[in-house]
Amino acid sequence: MATVTTPDDVRNDPDPDGGGPLIVGKHTLASRLIVGTGRYDTMDQMRDSLAASGADCVTVAVRRERLYDREGRNILDFIDGDRYTLLPNTAGCFNAADAIRAAKLGREILRTLGNPGADWVKLEVLGDSKTLLPDPIETVAACRELVDDGFSVLCYTSDCPVTALKLKQAGAASVMPAGSPIGSGQGLLNINNLRIILEYLKDDDPDYPVIIDAGVGTASDVSDAFELGADGVLLNTAIAHARDPILMASAMKHAAIAGRQAYLAGRIPRKLYGTASSPTEGVISTRPYGSQA
């Protein structure tokens, strides 16, 4: 059974990169950052960026065709199966039937490789190719069938709290609301809806993992997600399309740690007026607070 990470857990963690593990179903991840493997210029760049991110889970899209670079090398040649848990995803599917087929294909591939990621899938069922927003009806239907088939399902969804709750009720191991459309780099557009999702999904179930997926543009977006109370962040394009992907991957790693620890530490309340940070006794000036110069 998962446990809530406390500030003492962080203080006592011998690994300063900790912040507590991310637990999803049977999987316990040391890093709360999950990164994708697509859209890099080269597979060498992808490999080095994954390492710089500190992630121990990477997601890979399941495709009909085999993925090779210009030299004919397969993507799996650049992902250390002993270091990373692979999370197959159904990116590019537009209906439940195709997504279920892709999930089963991914499971068979990972079983062959002996990777522990064979029992889970990131479910992504898109509504259209322009916005890349999810189709909620097809997503819920696919989630139910995959859960019945024994999958641990991580569900990509919009920032709609009602849909997020239905996905949890359908058996999703984690619900993954979008910060903004895939690849848009707009960050977290609807903070209030994300807050409601966190409240709905964690009510009486504080360990339930909510992972922000999509829309991250830079490191501060990752910190924002964790400071909001998200349990994890999944991203891809913000690293792969950065001017320096490896440096950005490192920035994402540190942003995740900072955001998570800031959430656990608790921010101070926002106030309209200033509050002196030094003691007010014995000051030289006698001007009362609030007076005009």
Image: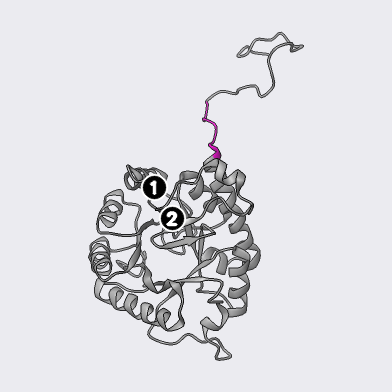
Is residue 244 visible in the rendered image? The answer is no
The span picked out in magenta is: 265-271
Q: Residue flagged by tag 2: what amino acid is it?
A: Ile
Q: Which mark is residue 194?
A: 1
Q: Which of the 4 image quadrants contains residue 61?
A: bottom left
Q: Kindly check if marks 2 and 1 are in contact, taking CB atoms under 8 A apart as contact.
A: yes
The residue closer to the viewer here, 217 or 146, is 146
Farthest-out residue, front: 1
Residue at (35%, 81%) from the top-left corner? 105
- Compared to 67, does 286 lie above or below? above
Quadrant showing the C terminus: top right
Q: Is residue 96 left or right of residue 5?
A: left
Farthest-out residue, right: 284
Q: Of marks 2 and 1, which one's residue comes earlier in the chain?
A: 1
- Compared to 232, does 39 lie above or below? below
Q: Which mark is residue 212?
A: 2
- Compared to 99, does 247 lie above or below? above
Give the colour scheme of this rendering.
Answer: one colour
Q: Is residue 272 magenta?
A: no
Q: Position of residue 59 (x, y in %)?
A: 46, 70
Determine the secondary structure under disc 1. Answer: helix
Q: Residue flagged by tag 1: what amino acid is it?
A: Leu
Q: Position of residue 222 (x, y in %)?
A: 53, 53
Is residue 217 visible in the rendered image? The answer is yes
Name the main secondary structure of what is drawn in magenta.
Answer: loop
Determine the secondary structure under disc 2. Answer: strand
Give neighbour class at mark 2: few <14, some 14-19, many 20+ (Cα, 10 Å): many
Farthest-out residue, top: 286
Residue at (56%, 77%) from the top-left corner? 80
Residue at (64%, 52%) from the top-left corner? 14
